[in-house]
Image (spheres, helix red, strand yellow):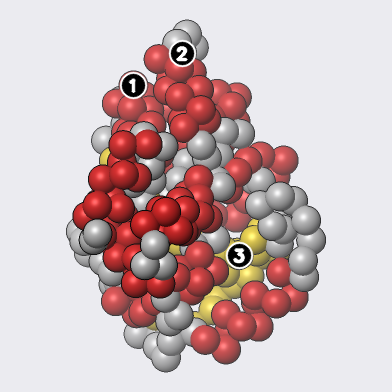
Amino acid sequence: MNGQDIKEEILRGGKYAGTDAGLLERICADMLSRYPNRKDAVKAVKRELHSIQGVFADNNGHARAEALINGYAGADMASDRGFALQLMGLHSSTRERIAEAESVFEFLGGIVSQGDAIVDVGCGYNLFSFPFLKTKPLTYEGFDADGRAVGVVNKYCEAAGLAYRARTLDAVTQRPDGECCVLFMFKMIPLLERQRKGRAYELLSEITYRAAVVSFPTRSVSGRRKGMETFYPPLFEKSLPPGLKISDRKDFTNEIFFILYPSQRRACPL
């Protein structure tokens, strides 16, 4: 028995068939080293995949999003905020922003310029929020471990006539390529740090950008308050790599945003 055997069994199940191949291989090898028994290893891989992607949006949610996009009968999908809210509601991370979508994206709009290239690590359904951005970036590249989420985002972009795209990526072992003016890492730092301590902060140092926007949840996925709003911010400020400075912070009901700039200001490469 090896990691490939475990991977093939997971893929036969279908639920995680769209998972980034590198991430799936990494988790299978890791869990097999911890659980020599095949049955236990398979269960452990499924638990880990659920915590990384399944807890945020299941395949039924992705199927419903695809059905909504395919059946869209409005005039302009790319600017339809009501439709955007429907799609955002099918992923727990974006669902948490619905009540304050106007305020959240008014805040983020002060960072994004028309000629910007956005790189979004752990994009999920973030792109569906773009109708709320008054200034649209020139390019957007989303990266996520969940291939089904990536597929839904790309279907939306094609249907809406947007030249934006998403790809799968294991952010624990890879960094996104391409030009980046503004980096988004929404609620990704706790997820990456749980998988490999220090990795989230490595990414913040490895990627070149003019500005970065990171955020932290204030509630668990189940909606419970666990003191996250007092735990994450000081830990983040303490762990921030040299050469990065916090220029702004904004607290919303379910999410805390930080705006970061390199101490040596960089121009957008586009």
Q: Label 1's element?
A: helix
Q: Looking at the picture, does residue 189 appear above or below residue 127?
A: below
Q: Is residue 103 left or right of residue 247?
A: right
- Residue 231 appears in the picture as rendered: yes
Q: Which residue is mark 3?
A: 216
* Mark 1 or mark 3, whichever is nearer to me: 3
- Give the CA separation, mark 1 to mark 3: 31 Å
**Which mark is first along the chain, 3 or 2?**
2
The percent position of residue 237, horizontal first and vertical second, equals 58, 84
Check whether the beta carbons of the residues at disc 1 and disc 3 lie within 8 A of each other: no
Check whether the beta carbons of the residues at disc 2 and disc 3 lie within 8 A of each other: no
The percent position of residue 235, horizontal first and vertical second, equals 61, 83
- Residue type at mark 3 is Phe
Q: Label 2's element?
A: loop
Check whether the beta carbons of the residues at disc 2 and disc 1 lie within 8 A of each other: yes
Q: Is residue 100 left or right of residue 243?
A: right
- Furthest-front residue in this view: 37
> Which of 176 and 212 lies nearest the eye of the viewer?
176
Neighbours of disc 2 within 10 Å: few (<14), some (14-19), many (20+): some
Q: Which residue sits at x=38%, y=42%?
A: 16
Q: Which residue is mark 1?
A: 159
Q: Looking at the picture, does residue 42 appear above or below residue 126?
A: below
The percent position of residue 231, horizontal first and vertical second, equals 70, 77
- Residue 122 appears in the picture as rendered: no
Q: Which residue is mark 2?
A: 72
- Residue type at mark 2 is Tyr
Neighbours of disc 3 within 10 Å: few (<14), some (14-19), many (20+): many
